[in-house]
Image (spheres, rainbow, N blue to C red):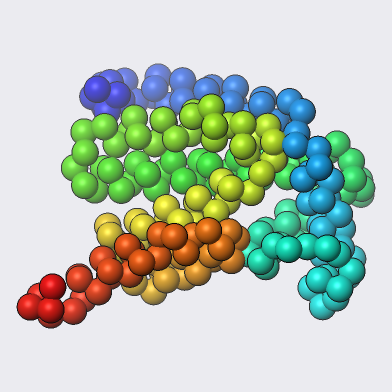
């Protein structure tokens, strides 16, 4: 349905989509999950000023290094454009906005997976994820890292099932695991799919 409308009026639909994304972004101004945000701010400060060398010694971090690399990148960009503290409200908003970019990426990969599978509702699928209240609350409001993990996991599924680029599916899945070890739940199914596609058919 939306795909037909988009084909008939692509410019108007694109403008509406961009407006909706901007409106979605305003959720970053709502109250965060303060306890976690303070921790992320502290970890970013440690990563920027002490690097990775002694990070686990000077913090109480129980995170795998995947999301820490993201914090390092976010902190580096933030310090490049401003001299404000990582404990500031500005960095909190910047971090939540950065997390929101991963939501856009995930929605795009969902669209690609459904579209390449010839699903008529590919566009709707991407939009449902992007404007799902849980997605918005988790990343843009609370500032959690689950959206980052979802991006790498969904991207790995795309590279495995759709584009058949096995190095990339392994790379993206590995990084999903480094962000959230819970990714391991999906590994057996994805690995079996990989084996079924690449081993002789008589085995399966």
Q: As drawn, is 177 to the left or to the right of 58?
A: left
Q: Is residue 80 in view from this perspective?
A: no
Task: Indicate the quadrant where residue 192 lies.
Answer: bottom left
Is 149 drawn above or below residue 6 in the view shown? below
- How many marks do you count on the picture? 0
Residue at 66% x, 59% y: name it. 67
Q: Is residue 183 in view from this perspective?
A: yes
Residue at 27% x, 57% y: name it. 162
Is 53 drawn above or below residue 12 in the view shown? below
Q: As drawn, is 82 to the left or to the right of 117?
A: right
Task: Indicate the quadrant where residue 167 lies.
Answer: bottom left
What is the quadrant of the N terminus in the image? top left
Q: Position of residue 180 (x, y in %)?
A: 58, 59
Q: As drawn, is 76 to the left or to the right of 164?
A: right
What is the quadrant of the C terminus in the image? bottom left
Q: Position of residue 33 (x, y in %)?
A: 75, 37
Q: Position of residue 118 (x, y in %)?
A: 19, 42
Residue at 70% x, 62% y: name it. 63
Task: Residue at the far left: name it.
Answer: 202
Is 201 drawn above or below residue 107 in the view shown? below
Residue at 49% x, 60% y: name it. 183
Q: Position of residue 181 (x, y in %)?
A: 56, 63
Task: Indicate the quadrant where residue 144 lies.
Answer: top right
């Amino acid at each position: 349905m939306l795909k037909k409308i988009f084909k008939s009026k692509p410019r108007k639909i694109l403008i509406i989509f961009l407006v909706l994304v901007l409106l979605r972004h305003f959720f970053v101004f709502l109250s965060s999950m303060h306890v976690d945000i303070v921790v992320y701010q502290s970890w970013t400060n440690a990563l920027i000023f002490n690097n990775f060398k002694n990070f686990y010694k000077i913090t109480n971090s129980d995170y795998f290094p995947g999301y820490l690399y993201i914090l390092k990148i976010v902190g580096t960009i933030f310090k490049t454009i401003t001299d404000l503290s990582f404990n500031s409200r500005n960095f909190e908003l910047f971090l939540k906005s950065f997390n929101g970019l991963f939501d856009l990426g995930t929605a795009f990969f969902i669209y690609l997976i459904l579209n390449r599978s010839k699903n008529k509702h590919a566009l709707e699928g991407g939009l449902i994820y992007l404007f799902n209240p849980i997605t918005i609350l988790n990343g843009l409001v609370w500032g959690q890292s689950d959206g980052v993990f979802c991006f790498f996991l969904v991207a790995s599924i795309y590279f495995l099932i759709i584009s058949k680029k096995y190095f990339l599916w392994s790379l993206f899945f590995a990084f999903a695991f480094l962000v959230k070890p819970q990714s391991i739940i999906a590994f057996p199914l994805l690995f079996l799919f990989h084996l079924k596609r690449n081993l002789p058919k008589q085995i399966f």
